[in-house]
Structure formats: structure tokens, C-alpha cells
Amino acid sequence: MKKQILFVDDEPNVLAGLRRSLRTQRAEWQMAFCDGARDALELIDQTHFDAVVTDMRMPGMDGGELLNRLAEKHPDTVRIVLSGHSDQETIMRSVGPAHQYLNKPCEVDVLKRVLARAFSLRELLGSEKIKSLISGMQSLPSMPALYMEMMQLLADPNASVRQVGDLIEQDPAMTAKTLQLVNSAFFGLGRHVSSPHDAASLLGLDILKSLVLSIGIFSQYDDIRFPVKGFSIEALWRHCSRVGGLARQMAEAEGVAKQMAQDCLLAGLLHDIGKLILAVNLPAEYQQMLDAVAAEPDQVDAIEQAAFGTSHGAVGAYLLGLWGLPESVVEAVAFHNHPGQQREVVFGVLSLVHVASGLVNQASQVKSLANAIDLEYLTAVDKEERLESWATLLDEIDP
């Protein structure tokens, strides 16, 4: 069945260009084009679209309001902003309802890839249950505004480390959390870092982006107003921080490429984001699940599957995939508890995040080693002899 995609822009030349450049997709996509948000809403009432790609600044109703209405009526629709406006106000208006933000002019191959990947996520993750579950949720975390601003800034080839540091310093809470994590033993810098400028210089902008994204997501909620007893957002963040830091150190010990080590950090920081999504949106069901797990702690995965019809890994991966995070990160989040379920069993980001999570859980006495790490999988990727060495990395770190 063809995917239904709606493009919305008030400039006729932009729509004509999209029609022309996407002509080769007509065998796979059924495309519609609207020159205004109000007309688009009428069309949305008549047809369910798999994705809507819209400009932001349009006369009358703008793209932000259109996406908000779309999120209310059809939360499972992929929502993408395609805009030439990168000012802070525009980003802030789109940050909640938009899954991704693309700059004009956007290469058609990039747009094709973003849409195709979003559609494939549902198939990759056994999607109907996840799609149905997420569609009914009212409080999915949004892409942090500061992260989107940072991405816009870094798209400028003339952007400097100082400009990125200035951007982060505008948010005191983000600055505090970032420096707390950067100064932890996981990064082993050997000196105290006192500003985001220093962090960017010492760690690199890619790692700083990962920290801003993960901290921004967790900061949207707090324990004070949280309805689930026995569930602490702060504790979850500490756990994810330890897993991300350990996964990165393990990657560096293996001598992998710099980008893979950075992906390990990000995947570790976000590997349990699905727990937060489920607990925030389905507190009663999550409370029942926690109560059941307390009685049978070794059956946590089976109990979660029975309660929600899917795993927290798949839920988190679905959201991160919609946001356009790297495929290796999405895969690691999806399968971090069951790495043998990946389509191709190879050593990679998933392997390191799985073991890092298992070692942290074992150290915290959440799970035994046998239940925390898939030793058969480690053998399959020819890394079983590295487990003892990796475990010593955690022993050396003061959590």
C-alpha cells in the first residue's frame, strides 16, 4: 500500500519543485500538495496521512498551529518541518509537535531518506502495537529546543565552539547538568571543567550535542509531580548516565572509530527512555507492572511485555527514530536487553550498550550477571573474552 504524504507551503514555486523532484516516488507514495494550512486541515479531515511536511511561516494559520492540530487528531502521523527560517521563535514553535526539522533548501535525497526511514521504523519494531500505544499518549517528550537550536547553529560552517558554549549557558539548568556529567569520572578528563566552552573544547561538539539532547529530554519531567510510586526519574537518569559513560569507555578501549564511541554514549544515555514514556503516559498500568516485578524481579521483561504488548526499548527506539537519530543508536535502544533479536548479529553500538547496561545493573544488584548479559550473544560476536576487562572499567569509576 502506498504511503500518503501531504506537503504544505504557501510558495507555489516550492510546491512545484517538490512535485517535480519527487516524481520518481509516485510508485511508492501517494502525494498531495496544499498552499495553506487551513486547506491542509480540511484535507487531513478527509484523508489519513502517514506523513505531513510543512513550512512554518505562512499567512493565516502557520505551520506550528497546523502541526499542533495534526498531533491532536492524528498523533501517529510523522510530522516534519521544512523551513528556511531558523530563528529561535520559529524553532520554539515547532519543537513540540514536530518530529524533525529540515532546513530549506533541502536536498531531495535527504527528504526521501528521512521519510523512508520513518516509515521503516514501524516495520522494524513490530510496529502496530507500538504505533497504537504511542498514538494514545498525550505527554511524549519533545525534542529539546536547545538541541534544535544547537543543530541549527552547527549547520553553519562558520559556527564556533564559543557560540555553542554561549547557547548552552543561556540555560542555567542545562549548564549545571552538563557540567555535572562532564566532570564525572566517566569522562576521565583529569581536570575540572567549569564552563560549556571548556566542555566543547575538550570533549568535542558531537558529545556535547548528545548530552544536551539526553538532559533536555529527562528535564521535561520531575519526581515531585510524578504519579508512580517506586519510580524515580533522577535514579533513571543516573543509571542511564552510568551506562552511557561506561559504553563510551568500553568503545574507546576497543579502539573503535570516534563516531561509534560517541553513538555508544548517546545510546547509553537514552537506552531506557521508553520507561519514562510508559510511566508518564500510562501511570496506572506502569504501577501495576512495578508491583508485579517486585514480586517476581527475574521476570521483568515478560511482565512488561504482558502489560504493554511491547518493550520499553521498542517504545523509546520508535520515538528516537522519528526524531532522526542515527540508526545504530535506535537499534541499540530497541534491543539493548535482547541483542540477539537484531536483524544482523554483529559487534557494534548495541553490543557495547547491552554489556554496559548489564554490568551497571549487576553492580546495582538489579539483576544477576546471567540475567543481565546475553553470554550466547557475546560469543556470537566473538567478544566473550572481553567481558572481564570491560567489568574492570566500571570498578575503576566512582559513580
Image (cartoon, rainbow, N blue to C red):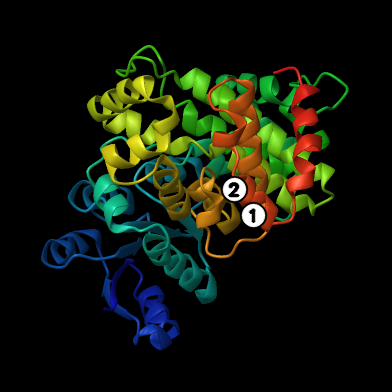
Residue 86, given in percent of the width and then of the height, sits at 51, 50
Residue at 18 percent of width and 51 percent of height: 73
Q: Is residue 19 above or below residue 203?
A: below
Q: Secondary structure at mark 2?
A: helix
Category of crowding for the residue at label 1, using alpha-carbon neighbours closer than 10 angstroms: few (below 14), some (14–19), many (at least 20): few
Q: Residue 296, located in which quarter of the rendered image?
A: top left
Q: Residue at x 25, y 64 (%)?
A: 36
| Kind of residue at badge 1 | Ala
- Measured Cα–Cα span from mark 1 to mark 2: 6 Å
Please state which amino acid type lies under the numbered disc 2: Met
The residue carrying mark 2 is: 151
- Quadrant of the snapshot with the N terminus: bottom left
- Looking at the picture, does residue 68 appear above or below residue 5? above
Question: Can residue 168 be seen at all in this image of the molecule?
Answer: no
The percent position of residue 4, horizontal first and vertical second, equals: 27, 72
Q: Residue furthest top?
A: 224
Asked which quadrant contains residue 14, the reply is bottom left
CB within 8 Å, label 1 to label 2: yes
359 relative to 92 in the view: left or right: right
Q: Is residue 108 above or below residue 388?
A: below
203 left or right, relative to 27: right
Q: Which residue appears at 64% of the width and 22% of the height?
A: 363
Residue placed under numbered mark 1 in the picture = 155
In the rendered image, residue 28, in percent from the top left (x then y), is placed at 35, 82
Residue occupying image coordinates x 68% and y 31%: 166
Q: Nearer the viewer, residue 359 or 274?
A: 359
